[in-house]
Each structure stands twice: as structure tokens, then as C-alpha cells.
Image (cartoon, rainbow, N blue to C red):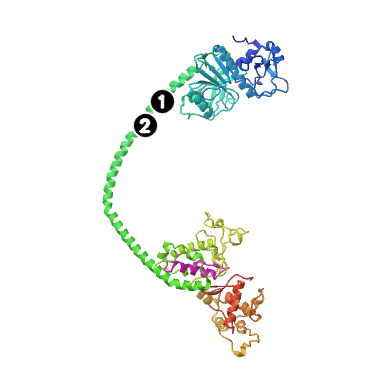
Amino acid sequence: MHAEIPPGQQVIAAANNRRHESRAAVQVFARDTRLDADAPLVYLAPGQADQLRPDARAGHLVCPLADCQDSTFVVRGGLVRRHHFAHRAGAGHHTAETIAHHTAKHLVARWLREQYPTATVYPDTKEVETGQRPDVLLELPDGTQVAYEVQFADLTAGAWQARRDRYASEGIKNVWLFGGRRYDRAPAPGVSGGDWVSLHGVFRSVLAELHPMLLIDPFAQTVALGAGDDVFELLVATDRRGWGARMSAQVGPRRLLQDLPATRGVLEVPGVRPLLEAARAERVRRTEEERLQAEHAEKTRADAEKRRAEEQERERLERERAERLDAQRRLGRERAEEAARAEQALQLARATQEADRRRALWAAERSRVEATIGPLPVAVDAPVAPAELAVTTAAPDEWRWRVLSALQANWGFTVNPQGLRTLIPRRDGIPTSQVDPLLGDFLVLLRAHGWVWFWGARRPRSGEAVRVLAGVGAHPQRPRSAQLKPLPSGRVSGPGPGNHPYLDVDGTPSVDPVDRSRAVGTDAASKAMESALEEEQQRMIRTALAEALPPEEAGADASGAPNLIGVYRALPEAARWCVSRDWPVWRLPPRLHETARLTFYVLAFVYRDQPQADVRLADCSPEDALSVLEELHRQGFVSHGALGWQATYGGVL
């Protein structure tokens, strides 16, 4: 028999068709220390505080929560607040959700014992075959098992489905009751009239499995059914695509759990059966409607496929006719292409023979070069690109050495890369533009070996000069691979030589312009000489540099110093320029110091940095002239390449 509820407590228990009461969580179950540990808990019915207070004072009734630090209970009751157990002041501190979940499952266990006196009820104490331990497990005498889950903690739709499927795999009925503010929460904005709650995401799976939306309030001891249009739509939508972010449910009457019946161990809430029967019927109707729509769509698709097949057959016949008409023209084109390929192969064979011939001619010259300066740099012997045979008539290592030698002669300067193209002999009919890919690839290789620097990723950018970083006797320093990483903008990442970034302090690119670079190539020396000086000045310079002065003007001193009067006469600016510079300590006889300074001046300003096979001033002997040039080379003022002596940026000037 249910305990009689005093009039003062009926308002609290009935909940009057509203959301769960906003009251402090109270405990209504206690463990009797005089009974076995698995004995049912003692329930404090409304209005029964006086009957149980002596047992609590005697210490027989204690807190049943396992993690309780001070389980001593006192009994409290009055006319307004529900009679309940409580901890002493400063003890307990259980969360409201913990108390609610504990109270709910023991209310369900107590209700099941009353419904099925001969059955066995396990409140959170027994595992089933799936390894799960239900909040409450009911075992009927015929062996039927019904698992009750009271859910207050947050649960995802996927997690609920997994737990539900595990129960179903062993044929265990399962009933889910949801409570607390996660599930029985405030209505969605704009919804008014009646008792409404917002639908938690877990109900997407719950309702799709045709499980009713059941809400439990353990403190009011009520259970309610969630219904409404959104709930019905989710019950019907088996594909679970009908979920919306602002869906809500209308809560039916909140009925006392003790007044509700059970069938075969399953809680019966008024309205559940009609709702589920209507949902099943609607599922059948929609399934049939979808079947008819699918049949209609299939018929429409089949008709369209038939028309498409007929159209494709017409197109096939037309295509075959067109292909037959084109067959002869295609055959003619193929024969013409085959003839063209044969001609190209013949031309390539001829080009290969010519390249081999030039390699043989260059082999002796290369031996002489290497006998003078040692083995050529490894970049000269880079793998041969097939395009070279169709573009140039020179041996690959021959034109590469020409380019590198011209660059070495300008060590420390920047050069215009356009002139380097003239160092690559082209086959007849090949435009200069086809030389650019060969030259660009070789310059990229030289940059990777540390000989030169430019910012373009594949070749020097438009208007960009090439800076020469090494020369004869100066070993190149390979840059790091990170410096040469190409960027989407078409340049390498850098930094450049001397750890210099692409952008200067003022934000301008640090690109060497071609208009301030040296001209190189086969015709650079003649062009420089033509624009250097007036005819009279050229005559005076040639006289001063190539002819010995008359004996009466020579006036060589006892030390044998060369007479440089003719040089100063031809180059009046030379003396002022040499005096204004700081010079290193020469490893030369004092009589040749002035000769060394003027020799550098002549190479840098008279010959405009163009290579010279021999440089002698006035009556300077060949031995002294060679000593001067070698000292300038040692100090870094000049370089010596295949084309001769040339001023550089080395030294302290």
C-alpha cells in the first residue's frame, strides 16, 4: 500500500502540470545499518518524519551515498517543506544532481517492488550479460529482464544509441527516464502556453527508436510524457534528418510515479501507446509514399534513360560516319608527322655528330686550360640537356667554361647576363631567345655552387644583373638550400650574399640593375674601346703603354725604375687618383710600387675592365710587368682568366 500523503504535501507531489519544482534537492532514502547491505533503502514518505526520527537519532538510518564522508542523518519535517533526511551542519555536500539521480533510481526501485512483489529488483547493483549495470534492473519470475536507466548527466545521441543497442543484443528491455535541467529544461524562446521544454540532442536517437520521451522529477516523484509536433516528427523520421536546433516538446501531465502501472515490467504512462501507434502508422504511410515516389522516379529515370540511349545511338551512327570521313585525313596527318619526326631525328643525329666533332676539337684546348689553371670547376661538367644539341654547336663543357671564365674575370662586379648569350655559339637559324633557357639553367647551377647570385628563381629577373661572387683562386661558398627556395612571386627566398635581405631598409628591392653592370660577351671589349676616348687620347695612351720612351726622356734611375713620364702625360688624372687612395703593403721592390698603382688604374679605367692578354707600362721589362700583375692578383685587385687580366673589386679599394 502507498503511504498516505498529508494535505500539506500534496501540492509539492502533484506539480500541477508545471516544469519540475525549483527547490533544493532533498534526500528521502536512508540505509538501515541493522539490515543487510543489499536490503532495500528506507523511504521517508511525506509526513512521516516523526515516525523515523528516533531511528535516525539512534544512528540506525544513515546516508546511502557511497562517497559520503559523514553519513549521520537527522530527520526534518514541517507543514510546508517535504519531510526528508539531512546531514548535520557542515557535512554531506552532495551535489543536487547526485542526490537527484540517487533518489530517482531508488524511487523507481521502490515502485517496481510494489508493482512486482515476487520479482527481484537490483538498484544499481547487478551487471547484465552485456557488461552494463543498469540504474535499476528488474528480473521477473519468468526470467524477463527490464533495465531502467535514469539519466541526469549529459549524454550524446551516439552514446545513447550504443548503450541501447547493447541491451537489445541480449534481448533486455530498457526504459529510459530523463531528468534535471539538461533534459527537463526551460522552454525555447517564443514558446508559451502550457508546459514546454527544449529538446536535448539525445532525443534525436531516443525518438527515432520509438522510445517515448519520459521526464522524471525525483523530488516531486512525478513522471511526464513529452509530445507535440516536433516530438512526433522525430518519432516518424527514421533517417534522423529531421533534427532542428530549436525544437521543443509539450510536456503532458506530470503524474505521480506511485500511481502509474506497469506491463511486463515496463512503465505505462498515459498517452504513450496512442502516440507510438500513431507514429508507427505515420511511418508506414510515409514509407509507402516514399515507395510510390521512388517507383515514379524510377519510371521517369527509365524513360529518360531510354530516350538518352536512343539519342546516343543516333549520335554513335553519326560519329562513325564522321570518323570514316576523317580517317583518310587523319592518316595523311600521321604520315606527315612521321615524316617530320624522321626529319627531326635526322637533324638531331647531325647535330649530335657536330657536337661530338666540337668536343673533339675542344678537348685539346681544355687540356691546355687545365694545364694552366688546374681542373675546371665541376659546374662545367654538368649533365648535358638534350636541347643543347639542337641549339648550340659547341661542346657543352666548352660553352659553359666560356661563360664561367667571363664571369670569373668580373669577380666582385655585376655583369649584364644578356652579353653572356654571345658566348654560346648557335646553330644556323636558331634565334637568341632559344639560348636563354640553356643560359638560365646554367646560371641557376652556378648560383647553387656559389659562383654567382641573382634573385630570380629560374633565371635573372628582367633588368637584373648577375653578381659574381668568386674568381680564379677564390673558391665559391655554396649557399644554403633554404636561401634558394623558390617563392610564388618568382624569386628565391634569400638572404643574399653577406646575409643581405631582398628588401633594403627603405623597402626597395636589393636587385643589382643591369644599367650599372659590366658588359660581357664577345663584342664587349671592342664596344668599350670605341666609346672610351677620343682618337687623340687613344693615340697618346697607346704610345705611352706600348712604346718605350726615347733614351733622352727615359731617365731611368740607378735602381732601374721604369720611366712613367709618358703614362702621366697620356693620363693626367692617374696621378691624382693614385695619390687619393690608400694602398696595401706591396711585396714588390720600391721601384715598382708606382708601376703597380698605375697598372691597376689602366686596367680599371682605360680598358674599362675588359680582359687584356698583356699590360706593360713605358719601358717596364716583361719580367717586372709580370711581377706587378701577379702582386695585384695576390692582393685581389685583378683576376686572370682565359681572356687575360682584368680588374676586380678585390683589395682595399
How many angstroms separate mark 1 from mark 2 (CA)? Answer: 15 Å
Q: Secondary structure at mark 1?
A: helix
Q: Which mark is residue 37?
A: none
Query: Does residue 451 appear left or right of residue 53 in this picture?
Result: left
Mark 1 vs mark 2, foreground winner is 1
In this orientation, does residue 174 appear? yes
Q: Kindly identify the residue that appears in the image at 42 percent across and 23 percent down.
A: 284
Query: Does residue 490 appear left or right of residue 343 in this picture?
Result: right
Kindly identify which residue carries mark 1: 287
In this orientation, does residue 78 appear? no
Above/below status of 415 relative to 311? below
Using the rendered view, name the quadrant where residue 328 is placed: bottom left
Amino acid under label 2? Ala
Kindly identify which residue carries mark 2: 297
Q: What quarter of the picture does the C terminus occupy?
A: bottom right
Q: Secondary structure at mark 2?
A: helix
Asked whether residue 291 is drawn in magenta, I would say no
Highlighted magenta segment, given as a residue range: 392-418
Outermost residue to the front: 36
Q: Return the x and y of residue 512 as percentages of the image width and height.
A: 56, 64
Using the rendered view, name the quadrant where residue 476 is placed: bottom right
Using the rendered view, name the quadrant where residue 124 is placed: top right
Q: Return the x and y of residue 85 as percentages of the image width and height.
A: 68, 17
Q: Mark 1–mark 2 contact, CB under 8 Å? A: no
Amino acid under label 1? Thr
Q: Return the x and y of residue 628 as percentages of the image width and height.
A: 60, 78
Above/below status of 24 relative to 386? above
Q: Kindly identify the residue that appears in the image at 39 percent across and 67 percent down.
A: 429
